[in-house]
Image (tube, grey):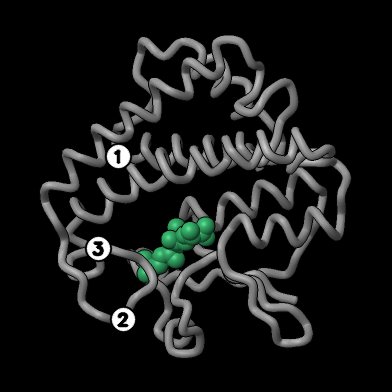
Amino acid sequence: MKLFTWGIAPNPRRVKIFLAEKGLNVPSEDVGVPGKAFLKPEFLEAHAHRRVPLLLLDDGTYIAEAMAICRYFEALHPEPALMGTNPQEVAVIDMWERLAEWEGMQAISEYYRNSKGSFTDRSLAGYSKTLEQIPALIERGEARLDLFYEKFDAQLSDNEYVAGERFSVADITTLCTIDFAAYSNLGIPENCQNLQRWYKSVSKRASVVN
Ligand SMILES: N[C@@H](CCC(=O)N[C@@H](CS)C(=O)NCC(=O)O)C(=O)O
């Protein structure tokens, strides 16, 4: 088994934190070009998926998408549960994790990939075809991110964690989204006190610090 990753890129980081929470050590290979904003040509040529994280199983099966990889390990190693233990919990965690990805991670990715010179002609990850940047998506990404912050701040006003009273994969995606946004100086707004409280607490977890 091998997990293909990329430095501190936010999506491989979701899997890295998930595995650390489970106490699992999976052989991995960083396929980023050091100091550059792209993946190694050998990786891109060998893997039509062209994105990380990507998990290669011993029988040759590939699993892409951070959440699919996490689900695989959750099924193999159910404890500690990070994706819920009963139908309701599973659905609520899945809902908040999806909201974090769709409304947060996509918003900051939209901003990031359309604003940085290193992504000219590669405004979406995973394609060899030229995809030009759309400048209007910079402002739109920022506006979407504000809405994400507002929604998650409200959710955390009466929940300790994003999906309720237990730490879950929804917290992992939310944290990776926020750290990625902070990297572009678009971190949690001052007025989102609930989110600030939550962020301080989850950032101290061993899985995040190490
Ligand atoms: N929805 C995917 C997103 C994967 C993704 O976009 N990964 C980025 C790194 S964060 C990537 O592989 N980028 C390759 C590139 O920019 O060429 C997931 O959950 O894994």
Indicate the position of residue 104 as horizontal and vertical percent values.
Answer: 41, 39
Residue type (three-letter) at the residue carrying disc 3: Ser
Residue type (three-letter) at the residue carrying disc 2: Ser
Q: Quadrant of residue 156?
A: top right
Return the residue at label 1. Answer: 184
Q: Earlier in the sequence, mark 2 or mark 1?
A: 2
SS under mark 3: loop
As drawn, which residue projects farthest toward the front? 87
Residue type (three-letter) at the residue carrying disc 1: Ser
Q: Are marks 1 and 3 in contact (CB under 8 Å)?
A: no
Q: Earlier in the sequence, mark 1 or mark 3?
A: 3
Compared across the picture, whether 204 is left or right of 196 comes to right
Compared across the picture, whether 93 is left or right of 111 comes to right
In the image, 121 versus 89, the foreground residue is 89
Return the residue at label 2. Answer: 128
Which residue is at a point 43% across and 45% down the rendered structure image? 102
Quarter occupied by the N terminus? bottom right
SS under mark 2: loop
Image vertical order of residue 126 relative to residue 61, above or below: above
- Real-space CA distance between mark 2 and mark 1, rounded to the nearest whole angstrom: 25 Å
Compared across the picture, whether 48 is left or right of 26 comes to left
Compared across the picture, whether 123 is left or right of 180 comes to left
Return the residue at label 3. Answer: 123
In the image, 199 versus 142, the foreground residue is 142
Ligand 1, image quadrant it occupies:
bottom left
Q: Quadrant of residue 117?
A: bottom left
Mark nearest the camera among 2 and 1 is 2
